[in-house]
Amino acid sequence: MIKVYRKTGTIKAEQFDGSDEMINKYHIELDHTYWCPFRLETPDGWLGVNINDWITTGVNSEHWPIADSVFKKTYAELPVIPKNVAKHIVTEHGLSDLIPIWGGIYRAMIQTVVYGYQKGDIGDWIINHSDMFARAWLDGYTVKADK
């Protein structure tokens, strides 16, 4: 029987633009004899990298190239959420899980709907961004920079 798996954790990735800055940062070499104009050293040896490919950083700080088309089918950027919503997730996340009826994400959503919310408060944001809130709760997030 085939089992289905999901990826766990997050990755750091940067789209390669061919700039001198990125070439130096990732120690990329020009290679006119290879099928790609650039090559990146990986734990498996030198691999070709094209402009617009993604360079990912692994758990041991190693780097891997991923073609743009593959990257876009495989990965999604973490949601960017306001600081007060992030604080709510940090506070509630460790106290309960999703399964019980009084689980944290369920409670947060229901309290917002049942008890109401004011325009501009955390409940307003949760209701208007419920998919993003759930993804942030489950997968992680980045915090929106202050203006």
Image: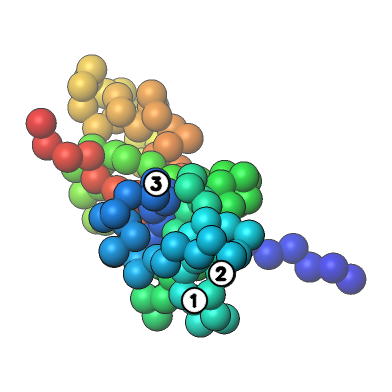
Can residue 135 be seen in this snapshot? yes
Q: Residue 32: percent from the left, percent from the top?
A: 53, 61
Cα–Cα gap, marks 2 and 1: 7 Å
Question: Are the residues at dot 2 and dot 1 in contact (C-beta closer than 8 Å)?
Answer: yes
Residue at image location 53% in from the left, 75% down from the top: 46
Q: Which residue is mark 3?
A: 17
Q: Disc number at residue 47? A: 2
User: Would you call the spot at circle 3 few (<14 residues within 10 Å), some (14-19), or many (20 or more)?
Assistant: some
Determine whether, in the image, residue 7 is placed left or right of residue 131. Answer: right
In the image, farthest residue toward the left: 147
Residue at image location 60% in from the left, 64% down from the top: 34
Check disc 1 and report its element: helix, strand or loop. Answer: strand
Question: Disc 1 marks which amino acid?
Answer: Thr
Determine whether, in the image, residue 71 is placed left or right of residue 16. Answer: right
Question: Disc 3 marks which amino acid?
Answer: Asp
- The residue closer to the viewer here, 34 or 111, is 34
Q: Which residue is mark 1?
A: 42
Determine whether, in the image, residue 33 is placed left or right of residue 81. Answer: right
Q: Earlier in the sequence, mark 1 or mark 3?
A: 3
The answer to whether residue 73 is above or below residue 10 is above
Q: Earlier in the sequence, mark 2 or mark 3?
A: 3
Question: Disc 2 marks which amino acid?
Answer: Leu
Cα–Cα gap, marks 1 and 3: 19 Å
